[in-house]
Amino acid sequence: MRKRIWIPVTLIAAAAVSFFGFAPGHVEGSMNQIDGKPLIAVSDEAKALHKTLNIVDLHSDTLMWNRDLNDSVARGHMDLPRLQQGNVALQLFSSVTKTPKNQNYDGNGADTDNITLLTIAQLQPVKTWSSLVERSLYHAQKRDDAVVASVGAIKAVDTAGQLDALISARQRDKRAVGAMLTIEGLQNLEGKAANLDRLYDAGFRMAGLTHFFDNELAGSMHGLKKGGLTPFGRDIVRRMEAKGMIIDIAHLSHKGVAEVLAMATRPIVSSHGGVQATCKVNRNLTDDEVRGVAKTGGVIGIGYWDGALCDTSPRAAAKAMKHVRDLVGIEHVALGSDYDGATTVRFDTSQLVQVTQALMDEGFTAAEIRAVMGESALRVIRAGLVPRASAQ
């Protein structure tokens, strides 16, 4: 006779609380770390210059995690208090909707997904459990809710006018931080061009075509086939340029990058990564790709993690930036941290003066440092936010 096994309700409840209450935070903390290696000494001159900068970071994945941007937390790389401490003027927050299991830089299929379990564990709305576009719309709502809860400290940036208003506000109060939405791979369109309108209406103003796997638009540099743009992908590129959505080539296959650069009529961004000249990793741009981005008038955001720099030191970041400057000009260099993107870094956003000091040590002038830390990105974003019909 089969025995019945009774599990106390309190034990089930305790297990549920443990999983849903603690597991997401534990996962986040384990995946977004500071490596603890020594930082560089920062001079009074660097500190003084840093306070005067309009800093722009082109890529962070903080919205993926189960916390409010306004909350000060002991894990990860970014929150409002740390953005203010680092003197960040504008942060671009990415929507990550799907990542493959056993993710790597060389070859991933599209048949697995880590984010589904994360959405369930975080008790996100049920509609996000099976829909990539709904995951992005949820991230947009998180941004908007944080803006309201911040009581003016976080300002949504969806238009060129809002960007100018932010910079003006920071002349009075440096604690104001702009928040702009971007997308890590347009697999969230789910093959439907109409979803681009839904995402635009929710506030997304920049998007990468692919993430870690090939999708309906193009091949990824980390995909299996690594092909170029599909007809659907070409259509979306044209629609994005017309709407005033900035095209991001980060993670796009090398063939796809060449095809986007050939058809681009507006500045292109590589939001986060490195350059193969200083770190020869498949993730990073070749010199020809750097020249191609510069030819469009765009910028290259340099990240701070090992895959972008083959190191995590601020000096390695400065050397990558120096290479881009020497190759195509200072106006094409920007910051792209990939904070909270399952990365291990040397410093979080509160310590961005580390980059200012490293650039000074590499011989960058104050004007060049202003360009790298934000002015060049502001130029591209301001122009990119203007819809085609109004761009005169």
Image (cartoon, grey):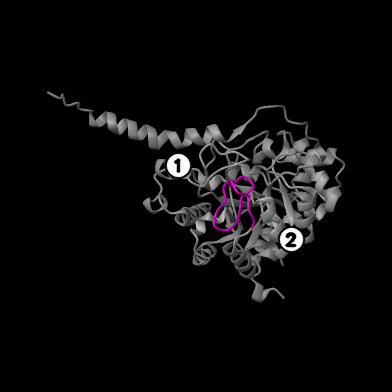
**Label 2's element?**
helix
Residue that mark 1 sits on: 118
In the shown orientation, is residue 251 left or right of residue 323?
left
Q: Earlier in the sequence, mark 1 or mark 2?
A: 1
Residue 284: x, y in percent?
A: 71, 44
In the image shown, does 225 or 14 lie closer to the viewer?
225
- Quick check: is 213 in the magenta stretch? yes
Q: x%, y% of residue 185?
A: 57, 53
Q: Quadrant of the N terminus?
A: top left
Asked whether 377 or 106 is in front, the reply is 106
Q: Please tell me how crowded label 2 is: few (under 14), some (14-19), or many (20+) other residues with Cα within 10 Å.
A: some
| Residue at screen point 79% across, 42% down | 277
Quadrant for the C terminus, please: bottom right
**Residue 171, visible in the rendered structure:** no
**Residue 20 appearing in the image:** yes
Task: Tell me which amino acid carries mark 1.
Answer: Leu
Residue depicted at x 85% and y 39%: 362
Residue 154 placed where, x, y %? 58, 53
The residue pinned by badge 2 equals 379
Judging depth in this view, the residue of 372 and 207 nearest the camera is 207
Which residue is the extreme one toward the left? 1
User: Who's the residue at 83% across and 41% down the image?
Assistant: 360
| 3D distance between C-alphas at marks 1 and 2 | 36 Å
Where residue 110 appears, as percent x and y from the top left, is: 51, 47
Residue 152 is tagged as: none
Tell me which segment is drawn in magenta.
212-228
Q: Amino acid at mark 2?
A: Arg
